[in-house]
Image: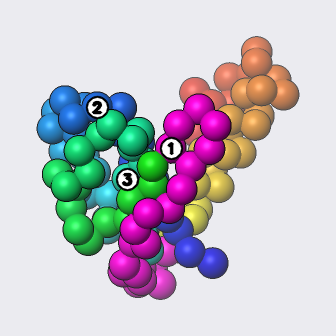
Amino acid sequence: GQIWIVEIKSSLADFRADGKWEAYRDHCDRLLFAVDAAFPADVLPENAGLIVADEYGAELLRHAPEHRLAAARRKAVTLRFARAAALRLHRIRDPDSRLGTLL
């Protein structure tokens, strides 16, 4: 399997104000941006994929190049994702639990 990160940008101002996405490449095999049709796609980096979406669906307009994660990084990312998912599910099933604050 692959780990993809899709960074959703609601506006050009959102893209310019948020530089966190630059560090995301170290944590995924493919990085993509999802924007609406009015977004100026030419400002997005060429080395990332592009998804254009609206309230009815989405279309992949540019495939993201693959940057395979090293095995150790893949394991760490997968375990962090699994832990976050398990804690969220636990909080849904038992909202009064303090498990999330203990781990």
* Mark 1–mark 3 CB contact (< 8 Å): no
Q: Which residue is mark 2?
A: 11
Give the class, few, some or many, for how many residues have Cα within 10 Å of label 2's Cα (few <14, many ≥20).
Answer: some
**C-alpha span from label 3 to label 2:** 12 Å
* Residue 11 x, y percent position in the rendering: 28, 31
**C-alpha span from label 1 to label 3:** 10 Å
Q: Amino acid at mark 3?
A: Phe
Q: Which residues are magenta?
A: 53-75
Pick whichever of labels 1 and 3 is earlier in the sequence: 3
In the picture shown, does residue 90 fall above or below 63? above
- Name the one closer to the observer, 20 or 16: 16
* Apparent side of residue 68 relative to residue 103 in the rendered image (left or right): left
Q: Which residue is mark 1?
A: 53
* Mark 3–mark 2 CB contact (< 8 Å): no
Tell me the SS state at disc 3. Answer: strand
**C-alpha span from label 1 to label 2:** 13 Å
Q: Quadrant of the N terminus?
A: bottom right
* Residue 48 x, y percent position in the rendering: 31, 66
Asked if residue 102 can be seen in this view, the reply is no
Q: Which residue is mark 3?
A: 33
Give the class, few, some or many, for how many residues have Cα within 10 Å of label 1's Cα (few <14, many ≥20).
Answer: some
Tell me the SS state at disc 1. Answer: strand
- Name the one closer to the observer, 78 or 96: 78
| Residue shown at 41% from the left, 39% from the top | 36
